[in-house]
Amino acid sequence: MFDEHIRNLEQTIRNYQASIEDEGLEPRVDVGINVGINEQRVLELIRINNRSTAKEIAESLSVSLRQGERIMAALKEKGLIKRVGSNKSGHWELRGG
């Protein structure tokens, strides 16, 4: 079931990326704060599924788990995401965007 969830999330991301490429645009979440492309992608992943784990996000971005954690930490530091609840059963909340 978890593998199916990952496949569905990856397909959603591929569809999103394809639609952006068709429009000739770069993925962008207008947050009014300078964020990198991977940070923008993480924000979009959280918008799609606010229960995404760091591991799922890292896999979706094709980066290491540690790099995914760093990206998410940077977003928390900028006040763009917030963890609500526990690490196991909580979810992410988008802030300021």
Image: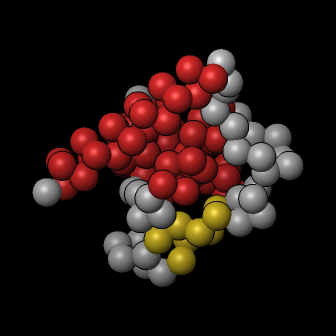
Quarter of the image with the C terminus is: bottom right
Q: Position of residue 73 (x, y in %)?
A: 61, 53
Task: Using residue 95 as the reference point, say whether residue 82 is left or right of it.
Answer: left
Q: Is residue 82 rendered to the left or right of residue 80?
A: left
Horizontal side, residue 70 vs residue 64: left or right: right
Toward the bottom, the furthest residue is 85
* Residue located farthest toward the left when viewing the structure as drawn: 1
Q: Where 65 falls versus 37 (above or below)?
A: below
Q: Quadrant of residue 96?
A: bottom right
Determine if residue 14 is in view: yes
What colour scheme does the image use? secondary structure
Rendered residue at 86%/49% (across/down): 32
Q: Position of residue 57 (x, y in %)?
A: 43, 45
Residue nearest the observer in this picture, 29 or 56: 29
- Numbered-mark total: 0
- Residue drawn at x 48%, y 81% is 85
**In which image quadrant can residue 94 be found?**
bottom right
Locate residue 87, reporting x and y percent.
41, 71
Residue 92: x and y in percent read: 53, 67
Name which residue lies at 57% across and 47% down: 44
Q: With respect to residue 27, does 76 lie above or below? A: below
- Residue 65 visible to the viewer: no
The quadrant of the rendering that contains the N terminus is bottom left
Name the residue located 17 percent from the left edge and 48 percent from the top edge.
Answer: 3
Left/right placement of residue 4 relative to residue 83 reads left
